[in-house]
Image (spheres, coloured by chain):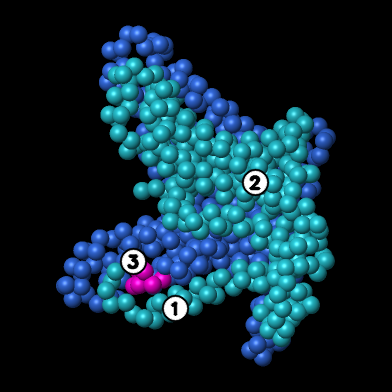
């Protein structure tokens, strides 16, 4: 998938790389001189290329290939062209899945990054005093995703031992007690909250680090010129933390698009398929319904979404690959 | 840093942080209180009794110990594999000249965008045809193979600043490319290789999707946890212990290395400036 991006730049790189490193030609006794580095590179790279081939290149090509076939269980695959894609977009469950994916991805990212960024800005007023608090919030990011799901299942429990329902009852609104994960109207919201809980730590740390790397002298100069803390915030801290925000948005978008664990643990895609994202839909169709071709077509749709949001990162990486 | 630190910012951040760890406290408290004391919620203080009953019983109720060993084995093998192969590849890409070098590099480092959903159908068919389902190799191969996209990127970035003089000195002294790697480059790149190891360990320890699909009998902790939590018994105390056991190792490693992790994850998903 990266090949088309790579091709134009390759010739340039090859031309540049023909420059012989210092000393290489001057040692006639060096073994394999005519082949240069090729034998050594082969020894170092072949295991990597084999493993990469099996677990990335082959699955990528194969997923795209079988998305054009009708494969059910162990029956012989039947070539159906793009019929899987037609069926996919005619399937109300899949169209609903696209909407769920969009809502889940955007709201998880928006909540995590905005809370993380706000906290990072607050922490910058007192970096040392807030160290412990930052680590406490960041710790949520280190909890296994399956465990995050489990923790929040116990908070959203429908009975009195569910923390959220008890909290609502505390304010004398027992009517608001709710089977949060059992209601198609609220289950997705519950998953968004749970995923955001774990997602805040990274934007917090990235934005905090971005602001901390601003030299002291810049801030001192601003204060010398009579800037108020709020205008320092507005004109220095906010713009300079944007790099951290961009990285955090990208990481959160990618993570939310491929989310699986938390949905699997909390709702299993239910109730009535209301929390199925594309990444979950493909699992369900291919691994529980054994419609492999259909599931592969859904995977290709997910792949396209991931590639679209990754275009800037891919360009950056490709340009930086020397 | 900004001089006049308003006190309220510390208070606000502190309150948020305390709210933030409530879910974690919840499962810890649930695991050490008798279930009959907390039927109205783990935070209730009607009767306060402490028990390690769930912590003792869980090992015989679920194959938790077996699962812990499996998880550790898988994570250690996958981590060692990545830590050995990544620096070799990064060295080859950075210091050696060979055909298609840049094309291969670009393909590998851009593969980080692939969601693991892309892998599951083709590898499921492949392992089924090869009879490798339920074999550790069925998850170890993709664990290591999928890691190269970010690990080679991270180590190669480090090598950009590696002093070329050292490599040239080695070459003049008659070292071949392999000996330069083994005696000069590898011993001086241990920091990024360790960072790669930590990230890979956390990732493989927490993996759920691949082992759930490819392993049946010996499953790692996250898979066991989903099986345990999927039952309808009212065993919140036992489940909480299982959840803590699942996440305690990665959480501790994460907290110890959290500074490096914040920097490393930036590289992992590729948006390095």
- Which residue bears the numbered disc 3? A238
Disc 3 is attached to a residue of which chain?
A: A
Is A104 located above or below residue A13 in the figure?
below
- Which residue bears the numbered disc 2? B72
- Magenta span: A124-130
Q: From mark 3 to mark 2, how far is it between C-alphas?
A: 43 Å
Q: Secondary structure at mark 3?
A: helix
* Labels 1 and 3 within one chain: no
Disc 1 is attached to a residue of which chain?
A: B
Percent x, y for residue B237?
Answer: 74, 68
Chain letter, cyan in picture: B
- Identify the image quadrant of residue B138: top right
Q: From mark 1 to mark 3, how far is it between C-alphas?
A: 19 Å
- Which residue bears the numbered disc 1? B12
Looking at this view, is A192 or B4 the one in front? B4
Percent x, y for residue B243?
Answer: 68, 61
Chain letter, blue in picture: A
Looking at this view, is A254 or A26 the one in front? A26
Q: From mark 2 to mark 1, how far is it between C-alphas?
A: 39 Å
- Front: mark 1 or 3: 1
Residue pushed farthest left? Answer: A225
Q: Is residue A96 visible?
A: no
* Labels 3 and 2 within one chain: no
Percent x, y for residue B9?
Answer: 39, 77
| Nearer-N-terminus badge (2/1) | 1
Q: Secondary structure at mark 2?
A: helix
Disc 2 is attached to a residue of which chain?
A: B
Query: Is A128 covered by the magenta stretch?
Result: yes
Percent x, y for residue A273?
Answer: 73, 61
Q: Residue at the spot x=83%, y=35% of the render? A: A75
Q: Residue at the spot x=41%, y=34% of the render? A: B187
Q: Secondary structure at mark 1?
A: helix
């Amino acid at each position: 998938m990266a090949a088309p991006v790579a091709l134009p730049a390759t010739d340039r790189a090859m031309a540049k790389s023909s420059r012989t490193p210092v000393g290489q030609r001057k040692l006639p006794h060096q073994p394999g001189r005519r082949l240069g580095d090729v034998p050594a590179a082969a020894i170092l790279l072949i295991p990597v290329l084999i493993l990469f081939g099996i677990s990335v290149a082959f699955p990528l090509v194969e997923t795209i290939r079988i998305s054009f076939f009708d494969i059910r269980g162990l029956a012989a695959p039947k070539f159906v062209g793009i019929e899987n894609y037609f069926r996919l977009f005619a399937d109300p469950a899949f169209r609903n899945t696209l909407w769920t994916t969009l809502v889940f991805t955007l709201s998880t990212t928006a909540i995590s990054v905005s809370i993380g960024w706000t906290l990072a800005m607050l922490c910058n007023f007192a970096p040392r005093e807030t160290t412990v608090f930052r680590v406490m919030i960041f710790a949520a990011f280190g909890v296994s995703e399956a465990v995050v799901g489990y923790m929040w299942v116990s908070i959203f429990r429908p009975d009195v031992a569910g923390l959220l329902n008890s909290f609502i009852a505390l304010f004398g609104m027992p009517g608001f007690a709710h089977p949060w994960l059992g209601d198609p109207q609220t289950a997705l919201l519950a998953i968004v909250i749970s995923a955001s809980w774990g997602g805040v730590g990274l934007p917090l740390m990235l934005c905090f680090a971005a602001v901390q790397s601003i030299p002291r002298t810049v801030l001192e100069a601003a204060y010398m010129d009579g800037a108020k803390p709020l205008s320092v915030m507005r004109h220095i801290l906010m713009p300079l933390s944007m790099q951290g925000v961009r990285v955090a948005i990208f990481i959160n978008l990618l993570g939310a698009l491929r989310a699986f664990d938390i949905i699997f643990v909390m709702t299993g895609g239910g109730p009535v398929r209301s929390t199925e994202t594309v990444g979950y839909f493909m699992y369900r169709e291919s691994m529980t319904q054994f419609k492999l071709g259909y599931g592969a077509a859904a995977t290709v749709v997910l792949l396209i979404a991931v590639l679209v949001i990754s275009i800037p990162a891919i360009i950056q990486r490709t340009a930086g690959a020397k | 840093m900004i001089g006049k630190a308003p006190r309220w910012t510390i208070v606000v951040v502190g309150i948020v942080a305390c709210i933030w760890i409530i879910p974690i406290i919840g499962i810890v408290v649930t695991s050490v209180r008798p279930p009959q004391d907390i039927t109205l919620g783990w935070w209730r203080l009607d009767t306060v009794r402490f028990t390690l009953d769930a912590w003792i019983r869980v090992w015989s109720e679920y194959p938790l110990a077996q699962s812990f060993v499996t998880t550790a084995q898988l994570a250690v093998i996958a981590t060692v594999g990545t830590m050995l192969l990544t620096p070799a590849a990064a060295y080859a890409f950075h210091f050696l000249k060979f055909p298609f070098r840049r094309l291969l590099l670009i393909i590998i480092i851009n593969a980080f965008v692939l969601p693991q959903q892309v892998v599951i159908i083709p590898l499921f068919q492949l392992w089924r045809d090869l009879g490798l389902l339920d074999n550790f190799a069925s998850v170890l191969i993709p664990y290591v193979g999928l890691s190269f996209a970010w690990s080679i990127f991270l180590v190669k970035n480090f090598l950009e600043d590696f002093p070329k003089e050292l490599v040239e000195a080695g070459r003049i002294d008659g070292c071949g490319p392999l000996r330069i790697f083994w005696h000069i480059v590898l011993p001086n790149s241990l920091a990024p290789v360790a960072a790669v190891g930590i990230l890979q360990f956390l990732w493989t320890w927490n993996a759920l999707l691949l082992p759930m699909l490819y392993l049946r009998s010996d499953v790692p902790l996250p898979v066991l946890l989903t099986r345990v939590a999927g039952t309808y018994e009212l065993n919140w105390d036992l489940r909480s212990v299982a959840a803590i056991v699942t996440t305690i190792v990665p959480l501790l490693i994460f907290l110890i290395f959290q500074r490096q992790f914040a920097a490393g994850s930036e590289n992992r998903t590729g948006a390095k400036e």
